[in-house]
Structures are given as structure tokens and as C-alpha cells.
Image (tube, rainbow, N blue to C red):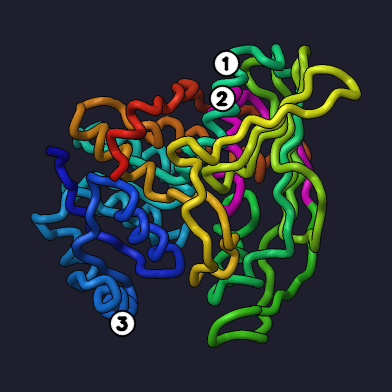
Amino acid sequence: MTKIFKVGLIGCGHISETYFRAEKYFNNIKIIKCADINHNNALKCAKIYKIKALTVQQLLKDKEIEIILNLTIPKAHYKVAKQSLLNGKHIYSEKPLAINFKDGKELINLAKKNKLYIGNAPDTFLGAGIQKSKELLEKKIIGKIILGNAVFAFPGVQSYHPNPEPWFAKKEGGPVIDMGPYYLTALVNLLGPAKKVTGSIVNGKKTRTIGIGPKKNKKFKVKCPTSYLSTITFHNGSVIHLTLSFDVIAHQNNHIELYGDKGSMIVPDPNMFGGSVFVCKNLGKPWKEYKTNKLPLGRINIRSQSSRANESPTNANYRGAGLSEMAFSMLNKKNNMCNGELSLHVLDIIKSIMHACKSGKVKFIKTRCKKPKIFKISDIKQILN
């Protein structure tokens, strides 16, 4: 019989709904208590999901809780994760690991010292779309990857988030911290660790208007750069141009395209779990589609709009897979896939991109991580209901 790990949620905001939904899909996690710096939010969450609301300190000290699920805003990730580890709790956090490298490294060292697991979103690279891309690349279907493009560009989170100000704050704001983890984790998963970055920044509108919720039509100031254009060189020799922007109304670029010496590949959205992979091996020939909609973590599981206004009416969204896979790894005493080493390397790339783009200088990545292994379907099936 599968062990169900008891999870305590800290941060009852916009994303929490998605993690409660994950309990439908995964067989080894159960959120039983919640807390929020605003206790009214915790009470509301507890009422909706029929769990118990505690203060943050009560939850951290609660002996029944085995894993803390940290869904706080980015600047609070480090503090909550550190307190969780100091209280003997395994920790799984939303992205990023921390908003500066020093804090992220401290968390990894603290987890090792206390022999606790640390996991970190994004877990979308565990989905069928990125995993199928990885499988095809490892079969050398397009040969050695020489270069590629990755693009995330839209008008900004203010259009769909009722409290978007943190995404435009001075230290924790901007598209690299917000969306960079999805693209960078997917690229590291596909290509291995990064070596160096260069780039430049573009500043968009200095004020934004909230488009949803009780503060709708309220204007607020932008305190960070809102577009980053960077070039990343990986240790395997691949060079990827990455655009991350909150200033683009619309575009028709693919999320990720990889160009090898034997062909080209279109990789599906790294912010989702499914999507088809497309491969072209000869000039002028049609692209071959590799569907993932019948694979575990690729099947469409959302067919109507949720309360998260930016979520597509139909897609494969299995957020929580990383938390479930960590629980599985804990039980089987093996390294989890969304592990601290990977998360720290991605954080290192994030901070290096921001530094290189602002300074105009080459920034070498300090850390390296092991290239993640393929998430085997046999392992996926062990955590699915």
C-alpha cells in the first residue's frame, strides 16, 4: 500500500488551487493543514478544502506535518524554506528557490546537513511534452544540437493576477525570475548544465494597470526591467538565444526551437505538461508530429476555465508531480528529480542572466548539475491514482 505523506501548505494564494487539484492525480500526498501570513486567507482556504488552518509558526512546529509546501511570494521562499528545514520538515517550494544565489546555496547546504529533502518547482519538465523531446534528443534524431531559440513574451501578469505588484518589484520582479525557471529548467533537462551568458535589457512601460480582481483598474509603478534578451552557452557546446519579456502584446514564435546538425525540433510549452513535439529532418519536407496526449502526464485533464484566469481551457496541467515524485523518492531513499542541485543551478543561471544583461558583460555560471535522467513511465505510474 502506498504511503500518503502529510503536507502542510504555507501561502494560500492564487496558485494553491492547482496543488489541491493535484491530489486527484497523485496517490502519495495529502494537504491536511494550511497557513498564511494573512490568517484570513488561511481560514478561507481551510473552509473551501475542509482542512485545518493554523498560524505559520504553528504549522512549522506541527509534528503531524512531514512536508511543507511553500507557495509564498518569491521573496519569502528562502525564509519559509529555511524555517521548515530548521524545524525538521522536508520542503517543496514554488519557483524560484530563492531570489539570490547566496540564500539558495544556504538552503541546499542546510537540507544536506539535516538530511532532509528539498524540492522546487517547476516540475513541468516531468511532463510528457518535455520528456518526449528529451527521449528524441537522446536518440540523436536531430543529431548534435548546435543552436536554438527560446521565447516567452506577453504583456505581463497584471492582466490575470489580482495582486501583480511583486512581479514588478525591484529585487524579486521581472520575467527572468517569473518565467525563466520554466524555460531554463527545460533547457538544462534537454541540454545539460549551462556555462556562460551574455545579454541586454529593454525597459517597457513604467506603470501597469491591474486587470482583474478587487483592485481592477488600479495603476502601480514598475520597479524592474521587463524584457531580457540573453544568449546562453551550454557545456555541451549548444548556444541558445532566450527572450523573456513582459512587453509583447502578441507574437507567433514557438516556445523552444532546437537546431541540430541532422534536423530541427519544436519543443512544446515548458510551462505546461503536454503538447506535441515536431521534428523536421530535410529542407522543404513536412514536420513530423510526435503526440503526447495519450501518455501519462500528457493527457488533457482540464476542459473548462479554472479560477486562474491565465489557464487555457484545455491542456495537460499536472502541477504537483514534482511534490509527489519527491515523496516517492523519500520513501525509496533516492534523489528526487526536482532536486536542490538542479534548482540551485537554474537560480545561478537566472541571477547570471540578470547580471549579464544589466552590465553588458559575459557572466560565467558558478555551479554545475547533473543532467536529469528521463522520467520513466514505470515510475510515473507508481505515483498516479
Q: Residue at x 26, y 69 (%)?
A: 35
Asked if labels 2 and 1 touch by Cβ distance under 8 angstroms, the answer is yes
Q: Nearer the viewer, residue 279 or 326?
A: 279
Where is residue 5 shown, x and y percent of the image?
A: 18, 47
Report the span colored magenta.
178-201
Q: Which residue is mark 2?
A: 134
CA–CA distance in space, label 2 to label 3: 44 Å
Q: Residue at x 80, y 59 (%)?
A: 250
Name the residue carrying label 3.
40
Q: Quadrant of the N terminus?
A: top left
The amino acid marked with disc number 1 is Glu
Q: Quadrant of residue 54?
A: bottom left
Disc 2 vs disc 3: which is toward the camera?
A: 2
For label 2, count other residues whose C-alpha is less than 10 Å away and answer few (under 14), some (14-19) or many (20+).
many
Q: Which mark is residue 138?
A: 1
* Tag 3: amino acid: Asn
- Mark 1 and mark 3 residues within 8 Å of each other at the beta carbon: no
